[in-house]
Image (cartoon, helix red, strand yellow):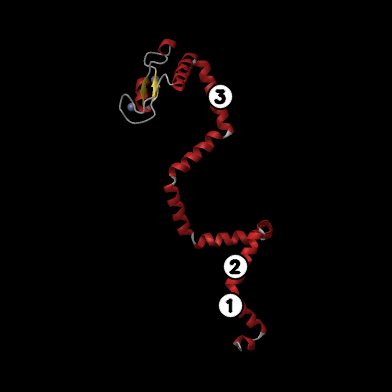
Amino acid sequence: MLDSSCFMPQKESQRQWYIRNRERLLLKAREYRIQNLEKTIECSKKWVAKNRDHVRQRQRNWYLRNKEEILKDRKQYRAENKDRINAATKKALMESPKRRETRRRIYARYTKNNPVKVKARRILKAAIRKGIVIRPSECSECKISCKPEAHHHKGYSDEYALDVLWVCKKCHWKFHA
Ligand SMILES: [Zn+2]
Ligand SMILES: [Zn+2]
């Protein structure tokens, strides 16, 4: 059968052939890339390194073109993952060596200045760990559901170390005000 492309100039017929086989060629290229993943990654890394400005410009253009949408997506993502992001930020902050060192120093100073309080808390902590004392899940004052803090309402001596009121942070402040 005589195909019309036979009469086209070389370049045009090549182009037509490419258009007809585009899907198949792209699939093949993709297969090749998957089979040679390391080589592909290596190549694209090299290309990016060599064309850094171009890549940056392209990203910039893409960002400008889609700015509104990107910002909207980002905002939505942040709103939906607020707690997770906050927790991650807090964790990173707490785990920073500088922060840890500061905390350790503050705690060491506190321990030195408040040995009786620290001892009472240590006794209580051990009792909780052993199941002798069970921390309730609400404040005994305002009944709000929370992880209450132990208030040593009879003082910090050993004999009263386990004699505590379980209160939320807010109510606990009132006792110490
Ligand atoms: Zn309370
Ligand atoms: Zn207290």
Q: Position of residue 67 (x, y in %)?
A: 48, 59
Residue 156 vertical position relative to residue 1 in the rendered view, above or below: above
Q: Residues within 10 Å of mark 3 (few under 14, many from 20)?
A: few
Q: In the visual, does 92 lie left or right of 80?
A: right
Q: Quadrant of ligand 1?
A: top left
**What is the C-alpha distance between the residues marked 2 and 1?**
13 Å
Query: Given the image, on which type of amino acid does mark 2 rest?
Result: Leu
The answer, for residue 123, to whether it is visible in the render is yes
- Which secondary structure, mark 3? helix
Residue nearest the viewer, comparing 22 with 99:
22
**Disc 1 C-beta below 8 A from ligand 1:** no
Q: In the visual, does 101 lie left or right of 151?
A: right
Residue nearest the viewer, comparing 163 with 37:
37
**What is the C-alpha distance between the residues marked 2 and 3?**
61 Å
The answer, for residue 177, to whether it is visible in the render is no
Q: Position of residue 44 (x, y in %)?
A: 66, 59
What residue did someone put label 3 on? 105
Mark 2 vs 3, N-terminal side:
2
Q: Mark 2 and 1 residues: CB-CB less than 8 Å, in contact?
A: no
Mark 3 vs 1, N-terminal side:
1
Camera-near label (3 vs 1) is 1
Query: Given the image, on which type of amino acid does mark 1 rest?
Result: Arg
Q: Mark 2 and 3 residues: CB-CB less than 8 Å, in contact?
A: no
Residue 119 vertical position relative to residue 140 in the rendered view, above or below: above
Q: Residues within 10 Å of mark 2 (few under 14, many from 20)?
A: few
- Which secondary structure, mark 1? helix
What residue did someone put label 1 on? 20
Residue in view at x 52 percent, y 18 percent = 111
Count the numbered circles shown: 3
**What is the C-alpha distance between the residues marked 3 and 1?**
72 Å
Q: Position of residue 165 (x, y in %)?
A: 36, 20
What residue did someone put label 2 on? 27
